[in-house]
Image (cartoon, grey):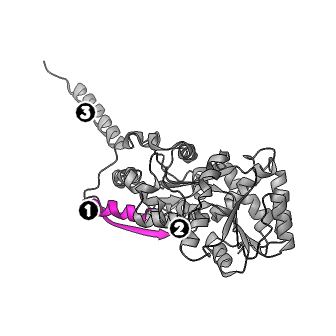
Amino acid sequence: MKVSSNVKALFATRLAALLGALWMAVPAHAADPVTINIVDVAGNLALTQKAFEAFRDANPGLVANMTFTNAPAPQLPGKIKAMQAAGRSDIDLVLTGTDALAAGNQQGLWLNLFPAYTAKFPGLLDKYAEGPAKMQELARGNGIEVTYMPAGPLLEYNPAHVTDVPRTPAQLLSWCKAHPNKLIYARPANSGPGRTFLMGLPYLLGDKDPHDPINGWDKTWAFLAQLDDCIPYYPGGTSAVMKELGEGTRDMTVTVTGWDINPRALGIVPAEFKVQAFDSMTWVNDAQYMVIPKGVPPEKFEVLFKLMNFMLEPKQQAMTYDDGYFYPGPAIKNVSIKDAPAHSQEVIQKYGRPEYTQLIAGHPQAVPLDAVAMVAAFQKWDQLIGAKKSK
C-alpha cells in the first residue's frame, strides 16, 4: 500500500514535535566535564566543602573544576536577578539559609526541582528526619535542604561579668538597661542568631500571631524598640558580634547552638563562656539549602542533580557535624555523632553542651517564617530598629 505524500508530511511533522518535546523534557548531557560554580551565603561551606570536593574528585568525567565563593545573603538576590536579566549564568549552585531562600522564592529566582525533576531524586525526600522534613517544606520545591539545626534563641554571656543571667525577655531588657552597650546582636537579614532571636520573641512574649510579623507582632516590635535604647549598634553579620564578645567589648549576645559551639572551638570566644535558654522557649529551627538559579545551562543539570543526591548520602551528612558550626548538622535520619569524623567527635565532646539534648527534647519546636513573612519581618526590622544603628 502506498502512503500519500500528505500522510508522510503529517507523520514527519508529528514526529518532529514529539522529538522536540522529549528534548525539552530531558536535560541535555554535557559532552565534556563541566565547571560548577558554587556561591555560599550561609557559611555552609564550613560543613560541606570537603564533601563537594569528594564528589569532584570521584567524578572527573563529570566535573572539570569546582569553584567556591562567599557572599552576603542580602546582596545575592539582586545579583542573580541582574544576571538573569542579562542572560548570563555565573552561578550554578547557591548554598543559602532561610533568608536568601525566602527572598529568592518570593522573586522567582530558583529552578523548581519538585515536581519538575522529582524523578531525578528517587527517595530523597523520604530521607529527612521529622524536624528537617518540616524545614524542607519551606523550600517550596525549589531547593534541597542539606543541613539542619534546632537553633534557638539562646543567650551567650561572659560568666565573669554576668552574674544575674536573664531567663525571660523582661529580665533581658532590665539587664541591658543596667549594662548599656554590653548587649549586641547582628542585623537579622544577614545573621542566623539575629533572625532566630527576632522570630523567637513572638513565642516568648505571647504575641497574637508568631507567623504574622506585620499584624501579629505588636509586643515584639515594642520590646525591640525598648531594647534598642541600650544597644550600641547592629553589626552586619554574626562574625563581628562574636569577635566583640570574645574580645570583651560586649558581655552578652543572642546565639544559636552552632554559633555557641563553633566560635569557642575556634578560639574566637573563650571556651568558658556560657549559654542560657529562655524559660518557656520555643525552638525556632534553622536549615541550609542547595538551590539552582534559573538560567543555569540545562547541560549542567544532570551533574548538579547527581551532586545534590550525593550530598544527602550518610557519609557526606556525617561530615556536617564539622566543628559544631551548625549543630548538630545532619538533615537525614540515623546519622549520629558516632558516624562523624574523629576530629568532629573530639570537638563536640570538648565544646558541645550536654544540656542541649534535654533542652531540644523538652521544648516545642517551630519552623521559621515563610518567604513572604520573613522578607516582611526583615524589612520592618530594618526600618524600625536598625535604620540608624546598623553597620
Element under disc 3: helix
x 62%, y 47%: residue: 361
Q: Is residue 16 magenta?
A: no
Q: What mark, if any, has residue 12 been given in the picture?
A: 3
Q: Residue at x 46, y 47 (%)?
A: 332
Dot 2 crowding, Cα within 10 Å, few <14, some 14–19, many 20+ = few
Mark number displayed over residue 244: none
Q: Position of residue 80 (x, y in %)?
A: 53, 61
Residue 28 place in picture, x, y as percent: 31, 49
- What amino acid is at disc 3? Ala
Q: Identify which residue, 207 or 261, lies in the foreground.
A: 261
Q: Is residue 361 above or below residue 316?
A: above
Q: Which residues are magenta?
A: 48-71
Which residue matches tag 1?
60
Q: Is residue 177 left or right of residue 24?
A: right
Question: How far apart, in angstroms, are the residues tagged by discs 3 and 2?
Answer: 70 Å
Farthest top residue?
1
Q: Are marks 2 and 1 in contact (CB under 8 Å)?
A: no
Depth check, front residue: 265 or 374: 265
Return the x and y of residue 141 as percentages of the image width and height.
51, 44
Q: Nearer the viewer, mark 2 or mark 1?
A: 2
Residue 217 placement, left or right of 372: right
- Mark 1, Cα crowd under 10 Å, few <14 / some 14-19 / many 20+, is few
Residue identified by numbered label 2: 350
